[in-house]
Image (tube, rainbow, N blue to C red):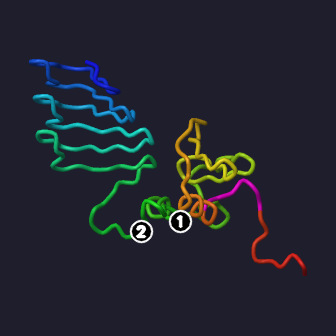
């Protein structure tokens, strides 16, 4: 079935989505799961283009219970969310995997860490080029343009491609 900017593959009954199927929104977000009477109904998963997913139980198109998992594997908790926010995920790997021994990079779980393109930053879900203000996925595909707030956060907190001497007065 085709809708304006959307598509559906799966069971149909009386011209409506029914049974198991896959519905793709114009934003490329996909729902894969159970349908009834043209609505999400039963178990299903929303897959977002950024790699995140929302697994839920649906009733007549409304989620009744679900779990949001970010692209890096972090599971959102509505209560006791005490260690990071969507704009500050610096301590996620430490919380999940513990501190690494002295001498090993804590900035990434990859060993060796990713090579960051010249002039760019590693912002957690891709590389950021401050000249163009574009974030590309590690695979090279476009993710998004950074707004002023995200630009400032990346420049202030993320790993850079170049080395800087920190804590030393260059005039001494």
Q: Which residues are magenta?
A: 158-163
Name the residue located 50 percent from the left edge and 64 percent from the top edge. 91
Q: Earlier in the sequence, mark 2 or mark 1?
A: 2
Relative to 152, is 140 above or below?
Answer: above
Q: Residues within 10 Å of mark 2 (few under 14, many from 20)?
A: few
Q: Which residue is mark 2?
A: 83
For the view shown, which residue lies furthest in the bottom direction? 172
2 or 1: mark nearer the eye: 2
Camera-nearest residue between 64 and 4? 4
Name the residue located 19 percent from the left edge and 25 percent from the top edge. 20
Q: Residues within 10 Å of mark 1 (few under 14, many from 20)?
A: few
Quarter of the figure with residue 108: bottom right
Q: Which residue is mark 1?
A: 99
Name the disc covering residue 136, or none: none
Where does residue 6 sit, x and y in percent of width and height?
32, 27
SS assignment for the magenta stretch, majority: loop
Relative to 100, is 170 above or below?
Answer: below
Query: On the picture, is 126 further left or further right than 2?
Result: right
Magenta segment includes 160: yes
Q: Which quadrant, please, contains the N terminus?
A: top left
Name the residue located 13 percent from the left edge and 18 percent from the top edge. 15
Q: Which quadrant, please, contains the C terminus?
A: bottom right
- How far apart marks 2 and 1 lie (CA) works out to 15 Å
Where does residue 123 sit, x and y in percent of width and height?
58, 54
């Amino acid at each position: 079935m085709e809708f304006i900017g959307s598509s559906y593959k799966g069971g149909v009954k009386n011209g409506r989505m029914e049974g198991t199927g896959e519905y793709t929104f114009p934003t490329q977000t996909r729902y894969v799961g159970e349908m009834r009477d043209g609505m999400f109904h039963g178990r299903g998963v929303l897959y977002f283009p950024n790699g995140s997913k929302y697994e839920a139980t649906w009733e007549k198109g409304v989620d009744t219970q679900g779990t949001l998992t970010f692209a890096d594997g972090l599971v959102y908790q509505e209560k006791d969310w005490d260690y990071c926010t969507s704009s500050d995920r610096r301590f996620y790997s430490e919380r999940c995997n513990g501190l690494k021994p002295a001498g090993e990079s804590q900035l990434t779980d990859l060993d060796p860490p990713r090579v960051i393109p010249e002039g760019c930053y590693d912002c957690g879900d891709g590389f950021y080029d401050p000249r163009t203000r574009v974030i590309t996925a590690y695979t090279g595909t476009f993710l998004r343009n950074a707004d002023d707030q995200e630009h400032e956060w990346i420049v202030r907190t993320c790993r850079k491609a170049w080395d800087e001497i920190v804590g030393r007065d260059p005039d001494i």
